[in-house]
Amino acid sequence: MAARLGFWAGTTTGAAWFDDISLTRLGRTPSAATWRILTLIYPRTDITVNGTDGVRRHLVGHMSQAQVQAAATAARAFVTTDIPALTSGEMVATTTVRVVGRTLTTLEPIGDGWWPSPVVTAADLDPRYDAVIVVWEPDVVDQATGVASWIGTAAGLTPGRGTGQTYTALIVAAATDYGHRNVFKHEFGHSLLFYFDAVGSAPRPTVDNHAYAWSYVHCGSGAPYVWQDETLADPIPHSIYNNASGFTHDYYSGTTALPSDPTTCLGITREAWASGSPRTS
């Protein structure tokens, strides 16, 4: 803070005198980043697919009621606890959890498996929300043979959707059984990075959260990250997924940097957050 004539690199010349200056603490300026997040839980999967051997298979899977409740609890905790910590308070987020009554009878193929893409869940995507998080069941049983299999392709998948509503899909095990909410953090981080890059309000180059040790450092200090996942039972200071001081926190909060340029902050800065959300920007 300074009282001065002109500003950095300005051409103003002359002399100025200042008298009786005081500083007054103000309340934090409300962020424009009010995000509404819709969580859709699909407890039942019932699809018929052609196997690699050409045999048509009827595959059915379903979550237990305990899994449904655990997924809903994890989603709410991610939004109410993790997001404020990850964004340094720059995102004001709420979530509505809907347990979808209809069964997933179609899935989109990807790689060696399938997933509930935005095309598959289109009927349930509510445009009043900025973001959608889908939780689904990929553990199925062949109804003809009784053989169990896993038809997913990853713990989570997030497509880039430009400046529109963001979308991410998580398998129920990642949302509940893993003992952490790191998949929420990672996949939702993808969706935010895609969105703000499309809007053009975040610094470039955009952060790639499929990183490795020394891909990024903390902006300003140049400190590297502990390349290990934390769990809810064992939080690790400055780990890649630590809410308070890790890689995930830093790119959500705009304080990630390249080792070659540790003073240029990347990620989602305050200015990017203030640019709004898919509904408001």
Image (cartoon, rainbow, N blue to C red):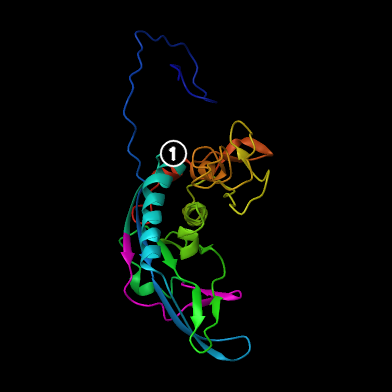
Q: Residue tagged by mark 1?
A: 88
* Left or right placement of residue 74 versus residue 11 in this view: left
Compared with residue 90, is residue 147 higher up or lower down, i.e. above or below? below
- What's under tag 1, amino acid-wise? Ser
User: Is residue 268 visible from the viewing direction of this image?
Assistant: no
Toward the viewer: 277 or 190? 190
User: Is residue 237 visible from the viewing direction of this image?
Assistant: yes
Label 1 residue SS = loop
Mark 1, Cα crowd under 10 Å, few <14 / some 14-19 / many 20+, is some
Residue 105 colored in magenta in the image: yes
Kindly identify the residue that appears in the image at 53 percent across and 44 percent down: 251
Kindly identify the residue that appears in the image at 63 percent across and 89 percent down: 53
Extreme residue toward the bottom, this view: 55
Q: Quadrant of residue 134?
A: bottom left
Residue 189 colored in magenta in the image: no
Percent across and percent down for residue 84 are 40, 43
Toward the viewer: 34 or 74? 74
**Span shown in magenta:** 97-116
- Give the number of callouts: 1
Percent across and percent down for residue 187 are 50, 57
Percent across and percent down for residue 139 are 50, 73
* Left or right placement of residue 152 versus residue 45 in this view: right
Percent across and percent down for residue 151 are 54, 75
